[in-house]
Structures are given as C-alpha cells and as structure tokens.
Amino acid sequence: MTLNFSLAFFAAVIGAFLGKYLGWAIRAWPGHEQFHCDYLACPKCEKGIKRGCYNAGATQDKLYIVFSALVAGLSVYFFGLSVKSVISWVFAAACLIITVVDCRYLIIPDRISVNGCYIGLIYAAVSSLWFYYTKTPLSYHIDFFDSLIGLAIGYGGLQILAWFALILLKKDGMGGGDIKLLGAIGAFLGWKGALTTMIIASFIGSIIGIATIIFQRIFYRKKYQPLSHMIPFGPYLCIGFLLVFYFGLEPFMKMFEAYQNWVIQ
C-alpha cells in the first residue's frame, strides 16, 4: 500500500508537470497545430484572467495541471507501473483536449482522431504480437482483428447515420470529427467497445440535451426550434469511451440486459 501510494505520488508530480502542456494543446486549436511556444502562455491578456478570454491562461491552466496530476496518480495507484496506467493518462488527456476544443469551436482535431485510428491499429498489432510470442497479454490488450473491425464499425456506423441524416434532413446531422473520433475509439476498444460507447454517448447526450431545452424554456422563455443548433457530440463520446475503458463492458452489458428484460415484460 505504501509503495503504491509513493509511486502514485511520483506519477502525480510528473502528471502536474505535463499538465501545462494540455493548455498548450488546447490553445493551439483551431488553425495552429504546430504547437508554437507562444501557446504556452496566454497572449491575449495579462495573466490570462480577462473574463471571456477563450485563450484564458492562469485559472484554466491550473485546472488542467490538477486534472493531469489526479489522472496520473490514480492511474498508477490502481494499475501500477504498467502500460495501462500510461494509456490511461494519454486517453484522459486526449479526451480533455477534445472536449474543450469541441465545446468552444465545434471541431475535433484530426491530429487526435485520425492519428488515433492509426495508433490504435499499431498498438493492437503490437499487443497481438506480444501475446503471440510471450503468451502473456499486456496490461491493456486488444486483438488486432478486433481493433480493425472496431475501427470499421466505429467509423462506418456514424458515417451511415450521417448519410441518412443528410438524406432525410437535407443537412449535416453528424460532424466528420465525430465520425473519425468513434473510429479511433473502435481501434482502441474493439467493435463491442465502439458500439457501447456510441450507445452511452447517445443516452447521455439526449439527457443533457433535453435538460438544456427545459432549462432554457423555464428560465429564458426560449422556445425549442428543432435542428436550429449544432451540439458538440465529441464530449459525450469521450465520456462513453472513458467509462468503457475504466469499467469494461460487463457493467453495461448487464444494464442493457436488464433494460431488455424490462421492455419485454
């Protein structure tokens, strides 16, 4: 227990050091994906505290540092010094960047989503080869063919929905960034993980969307106009992805089974 806590504390220190680069990455979008050193600090206002500054520095950067430290520490505490603990931090950091950028600009950086597809397949290939030769799986193992099918279903599933939306609604119903992101998620989680992520994301997005409509109706007397606003779907995909990664498929399979039994009855 003492050793785990010590390792977790050391990991949290490293995570805090890396946390400032999350703000760097978030400020770099959209349009400045080269990560110039200027983006390490907020150039818009002194100390980055000007209200409404999307490049806001001081306060948000502190939150990113705390987030990074917590994720790094908890990952090592629960998973030990392993591949899974490193991947845990990378996944959480990527999801934070996607969530903030998508909420602000309604885009998902291709550098994360598209490269995530490639990296997911490469990792799955390495994981499969490691298991084939050592007969011992990595701390986070995914079969290459499962990853390949997950990429196809994740990308293809949302792409088909986007085509249907375009045909029926005469407008884009799903952004290309969401499609590529679910493809990357499928590459890392497999086809079952991709489908589960999409279901969770759709459920959470629906609940929050309905709650937002009701809130605006009650407090701002704002009438709901169908298809009048674009909603960032990336954050919900990230939530579903992390839930499946950390808790696995079993809890959600039991929930789906319980729901199915309830509907049949």
Image: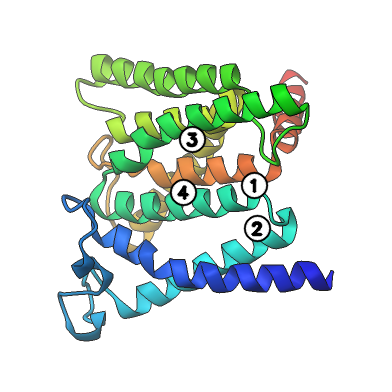
Q: Earlier in the sequence, mark 3 or mark 2?
A: 2
Residue corresponding to mark 4? 208
Q: Amino acid at mark 2?
A: Ser
Residue at x 58% of width, y 21% of height: 144
Which quarter of the figure has residue 142? top right
Quarter of the figure with the C terminus: top right
Q: Amino acid at mark 3?
A: Ser
Element under disc 1: helix
Lateral position of residue 222 relative to residue 187, left or right: left
Q: Nearer the viewer, mark 1 or mark 4?
A: 1
Q: Earlier in the sequence, mark 2 or mark 4?
A: 2
Using the numbered discs, state the Cα–Cα distance from disc 3 to disc 4 in whole angstroms: 10 Å
Element under disc 4: helix
Q: Amino acid at mark 1?
A: Lys
Residue corresponding to mark 3? 202
Q: Earlier in the sequence, mark 3 or mark 4?
A: 3
Residue 75's disc number = 2
Q: Nearer the viewer, residue 140 or 23?
A: 140
Element under disc 2: helix
